[in-house]
């Protein structure tokens, strides 16, 4: 079965929904490469939450300009030697397309080097094999004669420290904002239903989109699950989605695998968890070094994780999901990698990008914070402002950019609060207008 998220991945930049300012910058960058004028910033960094279209945009760019692609995943190949071997070599020389055609840079043909999950570079110490990945990326960007795109969920991890600052000066950052649920529902889910001949009410699509939290991939996966074996999706079908908490489910699965001494038990746990196996693998990878105190136990566990990651790579490359069973088998085998029985030595740690996801989830609803600010100018209690005034205020804020800009200044609203009030629409314009207002106010003071 083909995943709809892949089947309906945009083939061209013009098909990308949302983030049009970012798409325009990316298109202009591509035109510079095509014309032979190598841009000052030879690498772009795509920043944003999972599922906002970063990888799809990079692939669409290459498709639009007829470029070849060298795609690396930094969590798979993340040390200096491997990145130099693949990325740097590819950045310096001409290449051939997948069809065997020569791609001449003199004719505007290029290779696009995509390094996904670039924020997952692990800068090991001592004799660790996972060292110098960021250094190799810096060297690649400096000498490249081909366009480079780095894709990250958390830019802080990529740009922290002295090397991070060096890299930041070499690249142009492109921020991708999450789509609001109406964009996901009307522009993406509705289109897929039409092509798959699925009959569904618009309100149901809206609810699927709302549940995704701006993650387009998650929304499409949920739609495909509901449509499995049927041509009509009803209100009752929505009950099958349930209420899933990704972090809680994966935490529980990781805990079971680390504590268990039975591969069978761990396999059953994995079968019962409806979550991305790559996320579970990263949780295990993050925590076993703290829990498996015997080095031989730890070595065997990492061998199994490595094997699981190998099959995940094959799934991504070949789109053959029959390998998923092997992924789960190797992850479950982490339980029997140990010869000693361990207890948990503290609370499990989540990978950094999952911490960021959880923080964003906790801070999603800014209604009370904004109501508290509004109550000071409405001269009402926070509760009264919340229930009597807030909806009207938010409606005007969404439909009147000048009103939004003035109130951004008056209430000292943060960018995140503006995103909440507008549903991620016109945020840049509001921020620019609010800055102009503050400048004028300063000049008149």
Image (tube, rainbow, N blue to C red):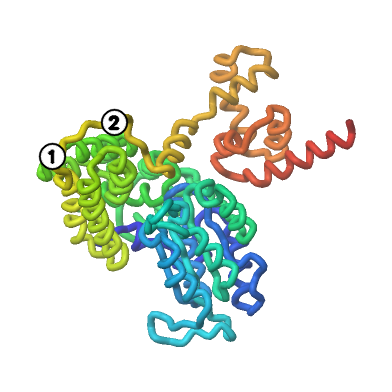
For the residues bearing labels 2 and 1, Cβ distance under 8 angstroms: no
**Circle 1 sits in a helix, a strand or a loop, which is it?**
loop
| Quadrant (top left/top right/bottom left/bottom right) for the C terminus | top right
Q: Nearer the viewer, residue 45 or 399?
A: 45
Note whether residue 230 is visible: no
How far apart in space, not on screen, are marks 2 and 1 (Cα)?
17 Å
The residue lying at 55 percent from left, 66 percent from top is: 139
Would residue 76 appear left or right of 311 to someone viewing this image?
A: right
Residue at the extreme right: 444
Q: Nearer the viewer, residue 116 or 83?
A: 83
Corner quadrant of residue 55: bottom left
Mark 2 burial class by Cα count in 10 Å: few <14, some 14-19, many 20+: few
Is 87 drawn above or below residue 261 in the view shown?
below
Residue at the extreme front: 126
Where is residue 249 shown, x and y percent of the image? 28, 37
Corner quadrant of residue 341: top left
Would residue 192 appear left or right of 172 to someone viewing this image?
A: left
Note whether residue 426 is visible: yes
**Residue at label 2?**
345
**Circle 2 sits in a helix, a strand or a loop, which is it?**
loop
The residue lying at 65 percent from left, 70 percent from top is: 39
Would residue 343 appear left or right of 5 to someone viewing this image?
A: left
| Quadrant (top left/top right/bottom left/bottom right) for the N terminus | bottom left
The residue lying at 16 percent from left, 52 percent from top is: 329
Where is residue 337 shown, x and y percent of the image? 17, 47
Q: Nearer the viewer, residue 155 or 205?
A: 155
Where is residue 91 shown, x and y percent of the image? 51, 74
| Mark 2 vs 1, N-terminal side | 1
Mark 1 burial class by Cα count in 10 Å: few <14, some 14-19, many 20+: many
| Label number found at residue 261 | 1
Where is residue 311 shown, x and y percent of the image? 24, 61
Of badges 2 and 1, nearer the viewer stands 2
């Amino acid at each position: 079965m083909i995943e709809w998220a892949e089947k309906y991945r945009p083939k061209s930049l013009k098909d990308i929904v949302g983030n049009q300012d970012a798409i325009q910058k990316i298109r202009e960058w591509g035109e510079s490469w095509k014309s032979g004028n190598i841009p000052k910033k030879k690498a772009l960094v795509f920043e944003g939450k999972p599922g906002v279209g970063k990888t799809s945009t990079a692939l669409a760019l290459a498709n639009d300009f007829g470029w070849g692609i060298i795609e690396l995943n930094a969590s798979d190949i993340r040390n200096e030697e491997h990145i130099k071997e693949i990325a740097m070599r590819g950045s310096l020389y001409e290449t051939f397309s997948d069809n065997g055609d020569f791609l001449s840079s003199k004719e505007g043909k290029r290779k696009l080097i995509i390094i996904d999950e670039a924020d997952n570079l692990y800068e090991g110490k001592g004799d660790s094999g996972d060292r110098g990945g960021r250094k190799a990326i810096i060297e690649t960007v400096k000498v490249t004669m081909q366009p480079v795109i780095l894709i990250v969920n958390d830019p802080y991890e990529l740009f922290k420290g002295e090397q991070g600052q060096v890299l930041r000066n070499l690249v142009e950052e492109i921020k991708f904002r999450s789509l609001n649920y109406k964009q996901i529902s009307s522009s993406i889910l509705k289109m897929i239903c039409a092509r798959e001949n699925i009959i569904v009410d618009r309100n149901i699509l809206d609810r699927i989109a709302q549940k995704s939290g701006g993650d387009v991939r998650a929304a499409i996966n949920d739609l495909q699950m509901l449509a499995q074996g049927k041509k009509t999706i009803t209100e009752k079908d929505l009950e099958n989605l349930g209420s899933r908490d990704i972090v809680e489910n994966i935490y529980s699965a990781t805990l079971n695998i680390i504590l268990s001494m039975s591969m069978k038990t761990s396999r059953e746990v994995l079968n019962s968890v409806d979550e991305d196996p790559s996320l579970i693998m990263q949780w295990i990878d993050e925590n076993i070094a703290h829990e498996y105190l015997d080095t031989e136990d730890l070595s065997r566990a990492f061998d199994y994780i490595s094997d699981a990651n190998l099959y995940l790579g094959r799934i991504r490359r070949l789109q053959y999901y029959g390998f998923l069973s092997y992924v789960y088998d190797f992850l479950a085998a982490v339980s029997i990698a140990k010869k000693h029985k361990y207890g948990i030595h503290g609370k499990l740690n989540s990978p950094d990008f999952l911490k960021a996801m959880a923080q964003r989830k906790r801070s999603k609803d800014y209604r009370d914070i904004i109501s508290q600010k509004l109550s000071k100018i409405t001269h009402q209690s926070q509760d009264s402002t919340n229930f009597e005034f807030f909806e009207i205020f938010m409606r005007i804020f969404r439909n009147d950019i000048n009103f939004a800009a003035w109130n951004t200044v008056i209430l000292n609203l943060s960018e995140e609060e503006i995103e909440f009030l507008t549903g991620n629409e016109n945020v840049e314009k509001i921020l620019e207008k609010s800055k102009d207002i503050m400048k004028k106010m300063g000049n008149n003071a």
